[in-house]
Amino acid sequence: MKQSVLLTGATGYIGRRLEKVLREREDITLRLLVRNTKKLTSKTLQHAEIVEGDTFRTAELRQALAGVDAAIYLIHSMGTGRDFSHLDRISAENFLTTCLEQGVKKIIYLGGLGLSESASAHLASRIETGEILASQPARIRTIWFRAGVIIGSGSTSFEIIRHLVEKLPVMITPRWVATLTQPIGIDDVIAYLTAALTLEPQENLVIDIGAPPMTFLEMLRQTALAMGFRRWILPVPILSPRLSSYWLTLLTPVPFKVGAALVEGLKSETLMQNDHAQQFFPEIQPIPFQQAVLQAIHELENDLVLSRWCDSSPGVVCDISEQEDPSASIFRDVRTISIAGMDPEQVFASIIGIGGESGWFKYTFLWKLRGWMDKAAGGYGLNRGRRNATDLRIGDALDFWKVADLVPNKRLLLLAQMKLPGKAWLEFDLQHDTLVQTAHFIPHGLLGRLYWYAVLPFHSLVFPDLCRKIVARTADRNRPPFP
């Protein structure tokens, strides 16, 4: 008989990769609990049952867990604000209660390495989540994996390390780079989570996973070696955690809150406390750190990145919900240009190729300036880039935008995630033989209105150039090569 499995967090960094593996398993009937069905791929929709909802809506949660044998919990509330631990607690309690009601046999949870007495606030919340999910051992088994730094294309830790190594020939680093942790490749994490589905423990299990211990300093050096760079790294005692967080924010794709959470976590060692991984899963041998780095680089260079750290989160910082509709916008900048005689598919390919390494055409320097302003305010800036050079999907990050809607060969709607006194969208719509490009803005109070009028001179430069260059790129694609 097939095992019925519920996967939560299926549009997140780990969830997307695990979902791809599980939907290809013939011995599993897969069900997903997601907040936004639009973020799922067509293959996922064909091979999995979907329940739209979250762990705070009891009715949908009951529906998702009905008839399930094993439930995989990949949910956390980092990014929602100061009350994240309270939300984590409610979510875990709701999930456990509903699992018990529906007769679920097993919960599989991924948390973080670390000890409660020395854990950062975010790690402490992850530990508490595990304790809640494992609090009814007589009624339901819980397999609680604990991992440290996860290395893979698109992971938070790898993106930070990669950007630091690429951009800084000489690094002055804080004392916390000497803290020990046990990194693990993303494929090994997926292997453990998948193998747990066939494990039938007699009691609850806490399973620490990871490669041999190493410091963040060693990770920087080995990454530089893997990338073919020679770097000089000088640890100094004068950089405070807050200054370190600003440093990471300016040089890497992560916003200030994410960088601050990472720095806080690196102040304490995160080492394995048991050998249960080897005991219960001897067939899985975590690959060395440098091999995980080389694999991540290969995926980046060949546009094989399946998921990224900013794919999903509990709040608007990295997600989309009811923000896809800009119809209530007060201010609009509308540009139209003829695409008569052009293949709409080719025009749309040019549209979804903007940003990232391709830049923003003639006025890329102005976009970069706006990106630096956003970084200075604690936002993403432009260096978040994009997952794939030629492909977009709903939920993807695109510099400081998020793909809120995508209708192939018809419409692309980008939601602004830069620091703004309001809400903004950038829309591309193919209407018969015309490309309609619209910037929408809903201001917040007087400051929002002043902001709109202040940036109008820049709009008059960048937006006409953007739509013209999109059409020109399409024409270049269709132009026959010289004989």
Image: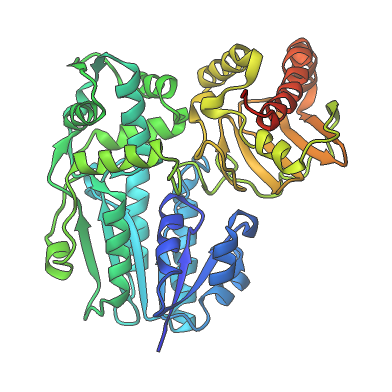
Where residue 458 sits: x, y (%)?
73, 12
Residue 429 relative to residue 367: left or right: right
Residue 129 relative to residue 239: left or right: right
Residue at the spot 39% in from the left edge and 36% down from the top edge: 301
Residue 374 in sight in this render? yes
Where residue 202 sits: x, y (%)?
21, 81
Residue 413 in sight in this render? no
Q: Quadrant of residue 55?
A: bottom right
Image quarter in which the C terminus is found: top right
Residue at the spot 60% in from the left edge and 47% down from the top edge: 393
Where residue 468 sits: x, y (%)?
76, 22
Q: Residue furthest front?
A: 483
Residue 84 sits above or below residue 459 on the image: below
Looking at the picture, the colour scheme in use is rainbow
Q: Quadrant of residue 442?
A: top right
Image quarter in which the N terminus is found: bottom left
Residue at the spot 26% in from the left edge and 76% down from the top edge: 199
Depth order, front residue of 288/269: 288
Residue 388 sits above or below residue 162 on the image: below
Residue 146 relative to residue 88: left or right: left
Q: Residue furthest bottom?
A: 1
Depth order, front residue of 463/340: 340
Where residue 406 sits: x, y (%)?
69, 47
Depth order, front residue of 478/318: 478
Residue at the spot 62% in from the left edge and 21% down from the top edge: 360
Q: Quadrant of residue 471?
A: top right
Q: How many labels, in total?
A: 0
